[in-house]
Amino acid sequence: MRVLLVEDDPMIGESVHKGLQQDGFAVDWVRDGVSAEAAWRANPFDVMLLDLGLPRKDGLEVLRALRRAGQDLPVLVVTARDAVRDRVAGLDAGADDYLVKPFDLDELAARIRALLRRRGGRADPLMRHGDLALNPATKEVHRAGEPVALSPREFALLEALLDRPGAVLSRAQLEERIYGWGQEVESNAVEVHIHALRRKLGTDFIRNVRGVGYKV
Amino acid sequence: MTSIRRKLLVWLLGALLIAGMVAAWGVYRQARAELDEVFDYHLRQMALALRDRNFEGLIVDPAELTDEFDFVIQVWSRDGVRMYFSRPHTGLPNQARLGFDTVQTEAGLWRVFATQERGITIQVAQPMSVRNRLAATSAFNTLSPFLLLLPFLGLIVWFVVGRELRSLETVARAINVRTASALDPLPATALPEEVRPLVDALNDLLQRLARVLAVQRDFVADAAHELRTPLAALMLQIQLAERAASEPERTAAFAVVRSGLARATRVVEQLLTLARQSPDTAERVTEPVDLAALARLVVAERSALADANGVDLGVTGVDSLTIEGEPEGLRILLGNLIDNALRYAARAGRVDVSVRRDGDAALLEVIDDGPGIPAPERERVFDRFYRRPGSESPGSGLGLAIVSNIALRHRARITLDDAPEGTGLAVRVLFSGQK
């Protein structure tokens, strides 16, 4: 899952960046409102973490521009402004959730997962496909009740595929979902991970649409 | 306790009484003068009328000599024998000088008129007490209305003053029912113009209090808000440290926690400094401060930090200047300016501090060779918690707000300009008119 982190404070930004990466998210971090806008226009993200007090362009402005552009990217506002009217303003401007600083990394990750789940139209916290169940919170995958051991990348790849069952995702799309900016991507990384997944889940589980991509 | 009502009553009635008495005295004096004239004329007429009489066996009808006027007539023959004595009176002079005279006797003062005709001396006398009594009666008649009116006047004064002072009670009640936070102005309409200045002054005070309270409230809100950011960073850093899997990872994580803690501490310290240096804090002790010595001291204090940043920090021009100020406040002011300059100075850059005489004023100058601040932003950097967009170093956003407060208390003016050479910022603090 690819997260756009918009945070001007270097200490908070660094910590959230690192913490979310540990939780298996691909995180892109920008430090001001103008860069945030450039980022969401240029790249597909699954969720945006938005600070409100931003240099160059206020967070609420970024949010309004995003919604005016017709983007339904889930936005979690993360800010020190905790007054009720600030929360109302944030939610009314198009935020999906609101988290007040200081906050807990685990809570942040849980809220991100909840946003992703709702965007996928699921109420069940587990992502299911056939007899396979994936738990985004615990990073566990079960097949017919039996646990399946996956590496973080394999897990991220499977999660991306399960997020939109039936849809064909290109290699580039899959790369974007599992790698943040500045992360080294080997040319055949996706194929390597797909191969490993097939080995663990069965060849038929992930299907290749030749010349287009992969789907479940 | 003094009572306006009682005081007014005593003074007004006292003044009235004194005025009445002065008037009575005036009337008495005038009446006496007029009576003297009238009675003297009378005495003379009486004596002259008696001249033509034959005093042998004369009997003046005693009814003619009424008690009220109390005339005493004496007639002496040529050889000094008293021929006639209208009424025996003790102590009257036997023989007075001719004409008018005032004679002191055992029975008081007498007014006497004597005339001589064909060897016979005729003397008519009258006690002065008669005249005094008549004049006193006139005076009393003048005074008596005052005395009669006095109690009524007293009542009226008591009542009217009481009624007018009720507006004060109204104001007091309006203040009494207030809560400590109700600082809206008191109603000043329909107040007497004597009470109005009091209410106006109170309203003025309330307004200033409200302003100070609002500033304080904003400050507390801002401070709480600003503390959230370093605390949020700390919380995240600690969580990452908890997650650390290996020992080196944990050590690195705790180093980050330490820097987060240092930052939070700095914000708290700066908040405290800001509160202490706020312009409305009372009780400031000023003393002569040698600016040159101060500049050397602060530069020496910051030299280690400058070395760590690889910045060449030094004092350039130093005029010997002494101003009246708060040594601690001025030290913080210069320290913050140098800290900022060090933070923004170029890599291997240079920061110059100078103290110069500028006409009548003392000029403190800190110049760095950093990127400078664009002119439109120069006003805003003094705002509390304002951070320049894109500034990497996580400052508290309070440094220049503190500087601004200290300058305000010293009635000094701060200007931000381009450095004289190249890029960079020149901060000038002008202490004027306090040589």
Image (cartoon, coloured by chain):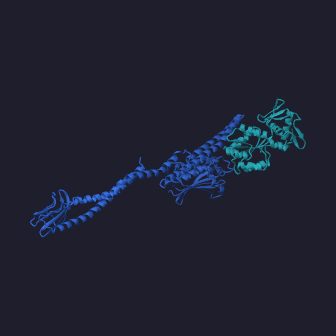
Q: Looking at this rendering, what residue extends furthest in the left direction?
A: B79
Q: Nearer the viewer, residue B60 or A98?
A: B60
**With respect to residue B33, does B203 lie above or below?**
above
Residue B16: x %, y % from top left = 36, 56
Q: Quadrant of residue A168?
A: top right
Left or right: B412 as drawn, with respect to B118: right
x and y percentages locating residue B429 in the rendered image:
57, 55
Q: Residue at x 74, y 39 (%)?
A: A111
Q: Colour of chain A?
A: cyan
Indicate the position of residue B371 as horizontal and vertical percent values. Answer: 67, 54
- Residue furthest to the top in view is A146
Image location (x, y in percent) of residue B129? 23, 58
- Work out whether residue B27 or residue A53 is closer to the camera in this orientation and state it: B27
Q: Which image quadrant is residue A24 in?
A: top right
Q: How many marks?
A: 0
| Quadrant holding the C terminus of chain A | top right
Residue positioned most to the right: A210
Residue A168 seen in render: yes
Q: Which image quarter is the N terminus of chain A in?
A: top right
Which chain is displayed in blue in the rendered image? B
User: Which residue is painted at 47% across and 54% down in the image?
Assistant: B194
Q: Residue furthest bottom?
A: B118
Please state if B402 lies on the left or on the right of B251 as rendered. left
* On screen, residue A3 above or below B242: below
Observer-nearest residue: B217 or B77? Answer: B77
